Amino acid sequence: MIKLVDVHKSFDSQVVLDGLSLEIPQGKITAVIGPSGEGKSVLLKHMIGLMRPDRGEVHVEGDNITSMRRFEMNRVWEKFGMLFQNAALFDSMTVFENVAFPLEEKTRLSRAEISDRVHDALENVGLRGIDRKYPDELSGGMKKRVGLARALLLNPRIVLFDEPTTGLDPVICRAIHQLIRETHESYGYTAVIVSHEIPEIFDISDSVAMLYRGKIIATDTPEGIRRSEHPVVRQFISGSLEGPIQFI
Ligand SMILES: Nc1ncnc2c1ncn2[C@@H]1O[C@H](COP(=O)(O)OP(=O)(O)OP(=O)(O)O)[C@@H](O)[C@H]1O
């Protein structure tokens, strides 16, 4: 479980997280939704300890990481896989080298073993025969799949997805969602997915948390969120221009 308790985070005078509390259940898929610029990426960075709260606490599977030192964080980071918004592939490396990178950094596996693991990982995300290509030569959907293969390679206990399907067409978007669900079923990781794909993301989520004005204003099953009477949740889900959310 990941637990955030009364987390506050500001950048200069801009308050982004304002007493946010949230529990992410173990082994489930949780979607985090909310208007653009509300702090969803900032929230993910707190979960993985890349950002520290000004106030409040962050716990990861029983460890209080709020002010944990770097050498202790290494042990916590081993639990995480992360798929960043832009897939964060290294442009100067081939697909094979990109996916092999965590294995080379973190394990003492032989070249042959690394090669087998990389090929298996690529096959699991439906990619074959692209080892020697460079990220520039891939479509957006393929890049995300390579990023997913890399994120899952060390069999992480927790995987954070920051907008895994942004900019992809609806069919590829569904394929990536399906892939997340399948890999989640076979690996059993705890997943947190920041997404703007509403209602599509609901189909693969066990629970949904909505971030608004620095706080989690609702957490529920996808069905509960769909039926919510909360005016902000209702407006956001329906995409209506009328309601408490102000668009500038
Ligand atoms: N390192 C930083 N320094 C200063 N401000 C930051 C930093 N990181 C994020 N912010 C600010 O925090 C706010 C929230 O950003 P964040 O990227 O978390 O939003 P988001 O909800 O993920 O948005 P989107 O849905 O558009 O991706 C923004 O106003 C952003 O400018």
Image (spheres, rainbow, N blue to C red):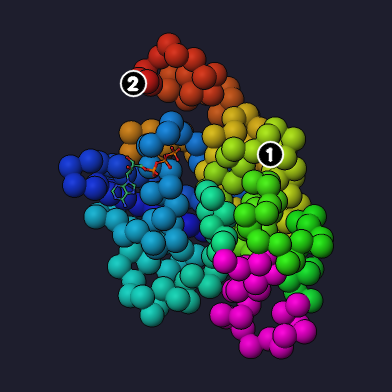
Q: Which residue is mark 2?
A: 248
Q: Measured along the vertical axis of the image, is residue 120 above or below residue 215?
A: below
Residue 178 against residue 158 in the figure, above or below = above
Say which quarter of the image contains residue 100.
bottom right
Residue 31, image x, y percentages: 56, 42
- Residue receiving disc 1: 173
Which element carries disc 1, helix, strand or loop?
helix
User: Is 219 in front, or is 156?
Assistant: 156
Residue interval drawn in magenta: 92-115
**Residue 211 in the figure: left or right of residue 120:** left
- Please report whichever mark, 1 or 2, sits nearer to the chain's N-terminal start: 1
Q: Residue furthest top?
A: 242
Which residue is pictured at 75% across the width and 74% down the height?
117
Residue 200, position as x, y percentages in the image: 66, 32
User: Mark 2, residues whose alpha carbon is within 10 Å: few (<14), some, or many (≥20)?
Assistant: few
- Going by the numbered disc 1, the residue's amino acid type is Cys
- Extreme residue toward the left, this view: 13
Q: Is residue 190 magenta?
A: no
Where's ligand 1: which quadrant?
Answer: top left
